[in-house]
């Protein structure tokens, strides 16, 4: 069995604000793991504990109790840090430098070989759609361009693990699409991506695993396809509903809705076979029969709403 890329085991972190007798539990007994080569969405409302978790993961903070391992090493271990690319939500930069100058500076900080710097920097700027802006000072960049540059610096060392905090923040729809495509290509190359985002419809298209926190506690964790699967309902798409069949559908408790010259029927999955046979006998063309799935946004709202 391969070593998890990220492993949290009963992690607790409590803050004691200065000049206050109160304690704030940022994380309470949080446990989850991320498998190498997958995209994991790390979700939760504001104040859920995501930033604290990422800070612990990166070695910026230490848990009060519990165990954290990153690529098989303790957080902050040089062996782990050398294999991590990190993009914070607000990427810090030197506005008087150009993009290539900043990337070259980060290569020096990381101890990377500068012999191939120009080639590597050119590849990364092209990958994040900043080719052609090499001479522009970063202070003149738009918010989206800064975000793209942050992703480029995270990829400098060809890391095994990417930790991305709101990676599409500030990007227009085209830019967000390009970043999501880039994340998918990284997964296809065997990279692990751990990302936090509030744009759930976009996350749903690329993530394999979901971790949901709220108020410092783990609420849901698992493979997205399993979490979204609804075991009690089925969707049947047909060409039409004959008048004589409408009453029978009502007896099944099925709901029929016209959709683009077809009819979508939602019914109890336990009666799927009976309903399909009824429709076939009535001469209907059954286009598809699929388990009914909810969306990631539905899952998130139900999970977080149920915890409040």
Image: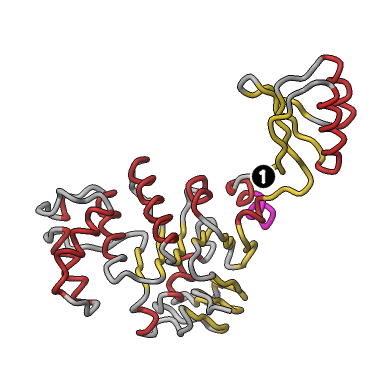
Where 153 falls versus 240 (above or below)?
below
Q: Main secondary structure of the magenta part?
A: helix
The residue positioned 50% from the left and 76% from the top of the image is 15
Verify whether residue 304 appears in magenta.
Answer: yes
Q: Which residue is mark 1?
A: 293
The residue positioned 35% from the left and 69% from the top of the image is 85
Using the rendered view, name the quadrant where residue 191 is placed.
Answer: bottom left
As rendered, which of 99 and 11 lies closer to the eye? 99
Provide residue 173's location: percent of width, then percent of height. 37, 40
Of all residues, the one furthest to the top in this rendering is: 243
> From the viewer's perspective, is 182 left or right of 32?
left
Provide residue 301's location: percent of width, then percent of height. 62, 49
Find the magenta span and give its range.
302-308
Say few, some or many: other residues with alpha carbon within 10 Å of mark 1 (under 14 / 14 to 19 / 20 or more): some
Where 148 falls versus 274 (above or below)?
below
As rendered, which of 297 and 253 lies closer to the eye? 253
As rendered, which of 78 and 289 lies closer to the eye? 289
The residue positioned 50% from the left and 70% from the top of the image is 36
- Quarter of the image containing the C terminus? bottom right
Provide residue 299's location: percent of width, then percent of height. 64, 50
Provide residue 180's location: percent of width, then percent of height. 41, 51
What colour scheme does the image use? secondary structure
The residue positioned 46% from the left and 78% from the top of the image is 70
Q: Secondary structure at mark 1?
A: strand
- Quarter of the image containing the N terminus? bottom right
Where 192 falls versus 19 (above or below)?
above
């Amino acid at each position: 069995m391969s070593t998890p890329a990220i492993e949290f085991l009963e992690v607790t972190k409590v803050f004691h604000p200065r000049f206050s007798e109160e304690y704030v539990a940022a994380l309470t007994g949080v446990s989850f793991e991320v498998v190498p080569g997958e995209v994991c969405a790390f979700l939760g409302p504001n104040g859920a504990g995501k930033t604290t978790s990422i800070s612990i993961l990166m070695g910026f903070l230490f848990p009060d109790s519990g165990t954290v391992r990153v690529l098989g090493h303790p957080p902050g271990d040089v062996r782990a840090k050398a294999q991590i690319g990190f993009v914070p939500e607000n990427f810090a930069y030197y506005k008087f430098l150009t993009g290539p100058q900043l990337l070259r500076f980060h290569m020096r900080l990381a101890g990377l070989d500068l012999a191939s710097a120009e080639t590597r920097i050119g590849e990364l700027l092209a990958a994040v759609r900043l080719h052609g802006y090499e001479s522009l000072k970063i202070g003149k960049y738009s918010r989206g361009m800064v975000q793209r540059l942050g992703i480029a610096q995270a990829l400098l060392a060809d890391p095994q693990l990417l930790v991305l905090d709101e990676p599409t923040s500030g990007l227009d729809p085209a830019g967000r699409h390009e970043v999501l495509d880039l994340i998918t290509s990284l997964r296809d190359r065997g990279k692990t991506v751990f990302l936090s985002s509030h744009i759930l419809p976009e996350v749903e298209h690329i993530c394999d695993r979901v971790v949901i926190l709220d108020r410092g506690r783990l609420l849901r964790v698992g493979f997205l396809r399993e979490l979204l699967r609804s075991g009690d309902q089925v969707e049947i798409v047909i060409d039409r509903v004959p008048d004589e069949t409408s009453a029978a559908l009502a007896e099944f408790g099925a709901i029929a809705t016209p959709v683009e010259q077809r009819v979508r029927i939602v019914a109890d999955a336990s009666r799927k076979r009976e309903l399909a046979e009824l429709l076939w006998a009535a001469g209907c063309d059954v286009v598809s029969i699929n388990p009914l799935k909810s969306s990631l946004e539905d899952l998130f709202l139900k999970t977080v709403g149920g915890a409040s």
